Image (spheres, coloured by chain):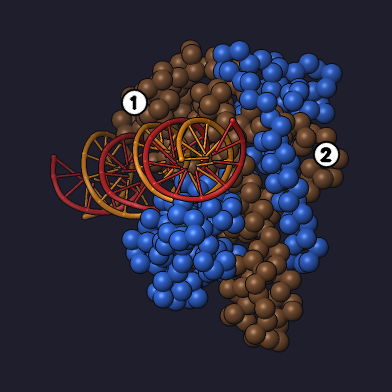
Chain colours: A blue, B brown, C red, D orange
DNA sequence: ATCTAATCTTTCGATGGCTAAAGATTTTAA
DNA sequence: TTAAAATCTTTAGCCATCGAAAGATTAGAT
């Protein structure tokens, strides 16, 4: 048995399932996939932590800010439209709006034309806050990003877009047939 | 004032803060930063959605799976080590372990040598589940990623790593004046 | 030996996020 | 006209996530 002590867990796990023939090739991919996973976790965590920090110093978290900005941008919009714009579920937007409304930054107005709809609009105070708000990504990140050579900025952006595209596509055609008890294979062959 | 109706919010916000001289140059960067932000949101959401899907069909969410795998990899580890390994806070790991323990997949054992520490280990059932578990990233994503040419895989990975690095560095830089010594420890020493 | 500082885990209180179901209204079709 | 279908928001219940503070224990210093 090969020593796997230092290998990332995904690798270790998968190695056990693969024949020796393709092993070396798969190794490479697995390793990268695993590192992608690690990087993603780091990135997600960094944004989370920034959000907390933001809230501590400006009183608003990133999603709250995001939603305020969306309302500012879109004007007098319905909840559903906001949700689509910021890429969150309606339920989530509702709960965030609850908090924003409680703080008097946003107002809900039931539509007169279609009483199922609810419009959100900024209050004067909300407007003011949006105008003075910091970026949802930290300034220093933007600064650092700005110093990268253009080719690198472009590379990062297109990588992210590719990744997002892959993931979204995967989500759509992923066949959810898995049960923990009887799944037998993993990275190598999933046929959807 | 330029019409900004169609510009994403980050741009709109940032433009308001900049003088006209550098505007065109900044425009480029802002636009990219904004698109980075959008892509990130998409990616994060895709992983979230996948996690829900996973949990619905296998009974385990991604973080739960991640933690099980980490324990499997590391053997008889303390909570703190697990937290570092999966890049989550201790508090988070504790609550996730609560659920895993309640389901009998994991067992906590207080260390005899140092009674502050708690070791986590897989139960037989937990072990079995880890061995049969699907990937924390969707199969079809891995499959698609696998078909990318090697240069692209490498490009994506290094972009992510660069991004993670920038963000972490920014978080450290942007540390509020409060506890300068406290903020850095998450990221600077992540090799356990 | 004891008091204090460091270390480790858990608890507490928030927020964010989702799906599914419930409520409310409007639209469509019989 | 009226019942069923579609549309929109909120509610309910769950999990993930964090920081801060509380508890417990060990290590260090006097």
Q: Residue at x 64, y 28 (%)?
A: B135
Residue at the (74%, 77%) spot, across then down: B25
Q: Position of residue B6 (x, y in %)?
A: 67, 69
Q: Residue at x 72, y 26 (%)?
A: A187
Distance from the alpha carbon under mark 2 to that under mark 1: 46 Å
Q: What residue is disc 1 on? A: B110
Location of residue B121 by image quarter: top left
Residue visible at 41% across and 76% down in the picture: A124
Residue B36 appears in view: yes
Mark 2–mark 1 CB contact (< 8 Å): no
The residue to which callout 2 is attached is: B148
Question: Looking at the figure, which quarter contains the N terminus of chain B?
Answer: bottom right
Q: Are marks 2 and 1 on the same chain?
A: yes
Residue A57 at x, y percent in the picture: 40, 66
Give the tally of numbered discs: 2
Give the letter of the chain under mark 2: B
Which numbered disc, 2 or 1, marks the residue closer to the eye?
Answer: 2
Q: How would you rate the neighbour count of disc 2 (Cα within 10 Å): few for under 14, some for 14-19, many for 20 or more?
A: few
What is the secondary structure assignment of the residue under circle 2? Answer: loop
Callout 1: residue from which chain?
B
- In the rendering, at what x and y percent does residue A39 appear? 63, 45
């Amino acid at each position: 048995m090969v020593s796997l002590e230092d290998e990332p867990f995904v690798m270790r796990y998968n190695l056990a399932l693969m024949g020796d023939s393709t092993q070396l090739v798969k190794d490479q991919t697995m390793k990268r996939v695993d590192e992608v996973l690690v990087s993603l976790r780091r990135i997600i965590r960094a944004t989370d932590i920034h959000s907390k920090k933001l809230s501590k110093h400006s009183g608003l978290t990133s999603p709250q800010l995001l939603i305020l900005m969306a309302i500012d941008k879109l004007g007098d919009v319905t909840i559903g439209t906001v949700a689509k714009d910021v890429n969150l579920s309606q339920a989530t937007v509702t709960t965030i709006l609850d908090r924003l409304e409680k703080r008097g930054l946003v107002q809900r107005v039931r539509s007169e034309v279609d009483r199922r709809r609810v419009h959100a609009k900024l209050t004067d105070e909300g407007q003011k806050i949006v105008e003075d708000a910091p970026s949802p990504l930290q300034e220093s990140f933007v600064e650092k990003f700005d110093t990268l050579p253009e080719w690198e900025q472009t590379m990062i952006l297109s990588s992210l877009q590719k990744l997002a595209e892959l993931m979204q596509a995967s989500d759509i055609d992923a066949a959810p047939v898995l049960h923990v008890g009887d799944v037998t294979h993993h990275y190598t062959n999933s046929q959807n």
